[in-house]
Amino acid sequence: QTPGLSVVIANKPVGVRCVGSFASSTLEMKTQKHYECSRGVEKLFCRPLTKLDTGCAGLCALAISPEPLEQQADLESLSICYNFTVLVHGQVPETWKNGIYAKVPTKGVRQWKRQKTEDSGADDHDSSITLSTTAIDLDNAIFINSLDVLSISGAEQQDEQCISTLTVSSCHDEGRMANVIPYILRKLEYPVVCDRFAKREYSRLPRKMKNVLK
């Protein structure tokens, strides 16, 4: 192990970027300054090992070293797996309690808007999501597991609304998982609560359920 090399875990709040030396407010710079002060040294190098979207809170792993970290062999053996807790509209299938795999789309990971493919002009948003009960390499897939379902009935039986709690795990490390996961679940017709593309589903929730979600 490289002398002075440490791997630390930091709690990233919503609104803070993981990577970047362009501002003192990024998690990378905050962590670097913290350990420079705590160790009483003038200069340390910091490298985020995990990436979360700016709008996503969670635990992040970072490496701290007195030497540049771009070619640290000690870090190459690390295996990083992301674990998210996700609320979705609707009651997911019972089979999801045993876990289900879904491949991460190979095109258009950043699904902000409808885009035309170069080959056929087809809508890339209409690409299907492949599900499997057989284990898939999580470097290019997510593993979805159903934990619980919250159900509230209205005056009529058809007014029943459900919110399912899922855990989603993946080793896909492009730093856009808070965008990839809602895209996949939206294609599976279980949109994430508060997804910008699921405002209609959220508006249908009874006030009592919205208060619970807050």
Image: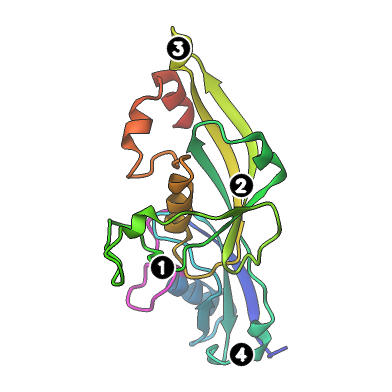
Residue identified by numbered label 3: 154
Q: Are marks 2 and 4 in contact (CB under 8 Å)?
A: no
Q: Earlier in the sequence, mark 3 or mark 2?
A: 3
Q: Which mark is residue 72?
A: 4
Q: Are marks 3 and 1 in contact (CB under 8 Å)?
A: no
The residue sitting at 58% across, 80% down in the picture is 64
Q: Which mark is residue 120?
A: none
| Secondary structure category for the residue under label 4 | loop
Left or right of 170, for residue 113? left
Tell me: residue 16, above or below residue 193.
below
Q: Which mark is residue 167?
A: 2
Could you give the CA–CA distance between mark 2 and mark 4, rounded to whole angstroms?
Answer: 32 Å
Q: Which residues are magenta?
A: 13-27
Estimate the x, y position of residue 169 in percent, counting from the top left.
61, 56
Estimate the x, y position of residue 91 in percent, counting from the top left.
55, 31
Q: Which mark is residue 107?
A: 1
| Between marks 1 and 4 in the image, the one whose residue lies nearer the viewer | 1
* Of the pair 130 and 20, the residue shown nearer to us: 130
Q: Are marks 1 and 4 in contact (CB under 8 Å)?
A: no
The residue sitting at 40% across, 24% down in the picture is 205
Tell me: residue 188, above or below residue 47.
above
Q: As shown in the figure, which amino acid type bears the numbered disc 2?
A: Thr
